[in-house]
């Protein structure tokens, strides 16, 4: 995988990766429960240390993105750490805003396109194609229907960062005579992405406990400690991506 990442980087691809959803300090991993991830359903729990890499996010040249919820806090599930976090972006957090009517609702997540076949397999739509849960939205135009689902994860956050990176290339890139379109060195894209992100300081206290689930109780599995200052820390990296600032605008 590292050879593939290196190949892409030196051919002008800005590599952006999800930090992961294991609520793990990537610089201090203790257990792995998600691999091997192919074939399906063969993952098992095993002790690990920092010599084990979560790829691609811990690969060379990859900008790792952590997730924040609607309140701006690090999402309970998001992996983090000063060793890898570059920037943060909206990833959703169902258990944000404890004690409010918004807690645990679909609106705390990110609306994304979703394949109809998967929705049918999981019985999230009925035989007629109507959603069976508020987490799924159906949109039809002239008899053609598309589906959207409220999701959460660093896989929701990293596309936000990738989108801002694309805007940076569209604003500052130069003509690519060989391939058409625009090009920009990945190192420069990363520098602009980091430099225009909005600084977010660690919460106080820095040892954070998360209230999750329908019972709204503290879940020790998601305990996390934020290290670093406002300009760079393990929860938010260099800050929250800012599309307006990235292209030279002002909010």
Image (cartoon, rainbow, N blue to C red):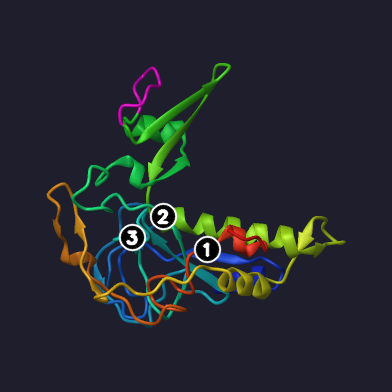
Using residue 73 as the reference point, say whether residue 159 is left or right of it.
right
Labelled disc at residue 147: none
Q: Which residue is drawn at 87% across and 61% down?
A: 177
Labelled disc at residue 91: 2
* Residue 56 in view in this figure: no
The boundaries of the magenta stretch are 125-133
* Residue 111 in view in this figure: yes
Dot 3 or dot 2: first in sequence order is 3
Dot 1 or dot 3: first in sequence order is 3
**x%, y% of residue 111?**
44, 42
Q: Residue furthest right?
A: 177
Which image quarter: residue 9? Answer: bottom right
Q: Is residue 146 above or below residue 247?
A: above
Q: Residues within 10 Å of mark 3 (few under 14, many from 20)?
A: many
Residue denoted by label 1: 241
Quadrant in the picture for the C terminus: bottom right
Q: Which residue is drawn at 34% across and 22% down?
A: 126
Foreground: disc 1 or disc 3: 1
Q: Which residue is drawn at 82% across and 58% down?
A: 179
Q: Which of 128 and 36 is in front in this view?
A: 128
Secondary structure category for the residue under label 3: loop
Residue denoted by label 3: 75
**x%, y% of residue 89?**
46, 60
| Disc 3 to disc 2: CB gap under 8 Å | yes
| Disc 2 to disc 1: CB gap under 8 Å | no
Predominant secondary structure, magenta span: loop
Q: Which of 179 and 89 is in front in this view?
A: 89
């Amino acid at each position: 995988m590292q050879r593939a990442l290196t190949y892409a980087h030196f051919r002008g691809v800005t590599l952006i990766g999800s930090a992961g959803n294991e609520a793990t300090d990537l610089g201090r991993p203790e257990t792995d429960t998600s691999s091997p991830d192919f074939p399906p359903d063969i993952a098992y729990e095993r002790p690990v240390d920092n010599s084990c890499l979560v790829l691609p996010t811990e690969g060379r040249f990859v900008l790792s993105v952590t997730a924040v919820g609607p309140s701006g806090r690090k999402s309970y599930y998001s992996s983090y750490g000063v060793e890898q976090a570059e920037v943060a972006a909206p990833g959703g957090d169902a258990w944000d805003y404890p004690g409010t009517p918004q807690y645990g609702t679909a609106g705390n997540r990110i609306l994304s396109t979703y394949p109809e076949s998967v929705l049918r397999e999981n019985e999230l739509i009925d035989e007629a194609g109507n959603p069976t849960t508020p987490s799924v939205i159906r949109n039809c135009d002239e008899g053609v229907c598309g589906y959207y689902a409220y999701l959460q994860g660093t896989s929701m956050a990293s596309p936000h960062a990738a989108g801002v990176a694309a805007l940076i290339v569209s604003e500052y890139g130069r003509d690519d005579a060989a391939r058409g379109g625009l090009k920009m060195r990945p190192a420069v894209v990363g520098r602009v992405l980091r430099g225009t992100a909005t600084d977010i300081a660690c919460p106080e206290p820095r040892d954070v406990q998360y209230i999750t689930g329908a019972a709204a109780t503290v879940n020790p599995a998601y305990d996390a400690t934020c290290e670093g200052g406002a300009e760079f820390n393990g929860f938010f990296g260099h800050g929250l991506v800012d599309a307006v600032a990235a292209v030279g605008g002002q909010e």
